């Protein structure tokens, strides 16, 4: 009987260690890990947005549940300097996302904390909430929507330092003015920040970039083998992005993987992950 109890206890400990190992193993750093891996990583756009309302803690939790490597989310700064996660429109327009009109930049966190999503009736998360939820569980691609570089950047860095999120986060933006700030930070600190240069469709200037250790985030239909090869020569990783209305298929994922895309940020992460795993198997 004692022997059976000991065996049972040992098995339980092994299972626990396995779970902890798998949680730690899910964390990837862009783009350092993608260069040391031969497998394309999958990233969930705004969380698992086709099952639960986008950019919410519940959508991020679903990505963790599905064992997706990474999720993307969008950040704005409120009137009282709180970082909140919402896609928004121009200057953080709430229309189409929450049950009250207005702009994130004109409202305080106390006001926004009472708002609920137009579907699923969920709260708006702060960046700190997402960090606490996802710490040591999943990678975060934080797209900075807010164009107020000098104001916003210090608040983001403060939280990254406080939660020691360096190995678990990449910053990205269409506002490339954030990159000089990141470059200055990296030149003066041991722990480094990763930046993703986001591009709108059909932009041909991407091949000019040589920013080693960072990423080029390109609309999926514009990613070619030539672009991937050139980026890799320049020490950069390639990440795809999809719009919410895109119809995603395994043929598209196959094209991206064969061309050499390092990260697929998409709206159907389970489908992409299933195809990715079958492709490499």
Image: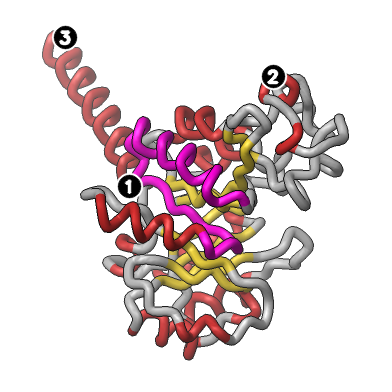
Image quadrant in which the C terminus is located: bottom left
- Mark 1 vs mark 2, CA separation in Å: 31 Å
Q: Which residue is mark 1?
A: 167
6 over 103 or under it: above or below:
above
Label 3's element? loop
Q: Which residue is mark 2?
A: 110
Chain part drawn in magenta: 148-177
In the picture provided, is 106 more to the left or to the right than 200? right
Q: Position of residue 46 (x, y in %)?
A: 63, 48
What label sits on residue 59 in the rendered view? none
Label 1's element? helix
Residue at 77% in and 52% down: 90
Q: Are marks 1 and 3 in contact (CB under 8 Å)?
A: no
43 over 214 or under it: above or below:
above
Q: Position of residue 42 (x, y in %)?
A: 50, 59
Q: Which residue is mark 3?
A: 1
How busy is the neighbourhood of tag 3: few (under 14 within 10 Å), some, or many (20 plus)?
Answer: few
Q: Nearer the viewer, mark 1 or mark 2?
A: 2
């Amino acid at each position: 009987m004692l022997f059976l109890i000991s065996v049972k206890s040992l098995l339980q400990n092994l299972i626990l260690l396995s779970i902890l190992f798998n949680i730690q193993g899910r964390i990837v750093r862009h783009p350092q890990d993608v260069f040391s891996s031969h497998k394309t990583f999958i990233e969930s756009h705004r969380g698992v947005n086709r099952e639960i309302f986008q950019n919410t803690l519940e959508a991020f939790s679903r990505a963790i549940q599905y064992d997706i490597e990474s999720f993307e989310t969008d950040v704005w700064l409120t009137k009282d300097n709180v970082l909140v996660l919402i896609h928004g429109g121009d200057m953080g327009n709430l229309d189409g996302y929450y049950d009250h009109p207005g702009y994130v930049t004109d409202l305080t966190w106390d006001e926004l904390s009472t708002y609920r999503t137009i579907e699923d009736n969920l709260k708006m998360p702060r960046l700190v909430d997402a960090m606490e939820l996802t710490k040591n569980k999943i990678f975060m691609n934080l797209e900075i929507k807010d164009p107020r570089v000098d104001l916003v950047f210090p608040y983001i860095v403060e939280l990254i330092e406080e939660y020691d999120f360096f190995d678990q986060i990449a910053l990205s933006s269409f506002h490339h003015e954030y990159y000089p700030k990141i470059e200055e930070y990296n030149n003066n600190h041991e722990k480094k920040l990763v930046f993703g240069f986001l591009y709108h469709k059909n932009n041909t200037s991407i091949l000019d970039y040589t920013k080693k250790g960072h990423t080029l985030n390109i609309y999926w239909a514009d990613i070619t083998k030539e672009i991937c090869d050139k980026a890799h020569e320049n020490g950069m990783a390639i990440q795809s992005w999809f719009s919410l209305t895109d119809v995603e298929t395994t043929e598209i994922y196959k094209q991206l993987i064969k061309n050499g895309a390092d990260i697929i940020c998409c709206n159907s992460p389970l489908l992409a992950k299933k195809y990715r795993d079958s492709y490499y198997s």
